[in-house]
């Protein structure tokens, strides 16, 4: 149950931040291309997270707070490619 709650929190934060970036930034690509790119990045990133967590096991460095930080930070990469905004 706690894992489901964490997934819900991460998903909510992700969509709110992506929507804010989408509304406030100058776009380089069409809306459909942007959303498809973000969806595939999210799926790939989550699969990679699951693989890493399963390989390392439940260590202290890969619990909730670190994953929140890593997820938020790595979304800078696709946002930099999809929007014509400075860092």
Image: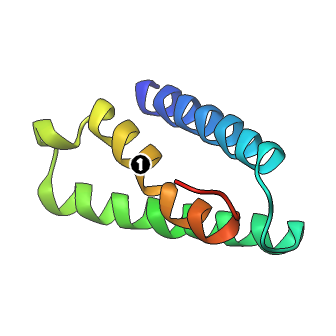
Residue at the front extreme, as displayed: 86
Q: Is residue 36 left or right of residue 44?
A: right
Task: Give the labeled residue for mark 1.
Answer: 73
Q: Nearer the viewer, residue 44 or 55?
A: 44
Identify the residue at image location x=87%, y=70%.
32
Q: How are the residues colored?
A: rainbow
Rendered position, 37 above or below 7:
below
Q: Residue at x 43, y 56 (%)?
A: 74
Nearer to the camera, 45 or 8:
45
The crowd level at tag 1 (other Cα within 10 Å; few <14, some 14-19, many 20+) is few
Residue in the picture at 35% in, 59% down: 50
In the depicted view, which residue is nearer to us: 48 or 77? 77
Q: Give the SS element for disc 1.
A: helix
Say which quarter of the image contains residue 28: bottom right
Q: How many marks?
A: 1
60 sits left or right of 66 in the view = left
- Asked whether, in this view, residue 54 is left or right of residue 3, the answer is left
Looking at the picture, how far across and down is residue 24, in whole percent? 79, 43
Question: What residue lies at 70% left-to-right and 64% top-to-bottom?
Answer: 84
18 to the left or right of 55: right
User: Residue 67, relative to residue 85: is it above or below?
Assistant: above
Which of the 4 image quarters holds residue 12? top right
Position in image of residue 44 (x %, y %): 50, 70
Locate residue 17, reporting x and y percent: 65, 38
């Amino acid at each position: 149950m706690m894992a489901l709650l964490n997934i819900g929190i991460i998903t909510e934060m992700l969509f709110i931040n992506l929507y804010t970036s989408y509304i406030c930034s100058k776009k380089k690509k069409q809306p459909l291309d942007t959303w498809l790119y973000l969806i595939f990045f999210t799926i790939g990133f989550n699969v990679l997270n699951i693989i890493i967590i399963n390989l390392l096991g439940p260590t202290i460095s890969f619990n909730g707070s670190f994953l929140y930080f890593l997820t938020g930070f790595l979304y800078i990469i696709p946002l930099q490619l999809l929007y014509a905004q400075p860092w």
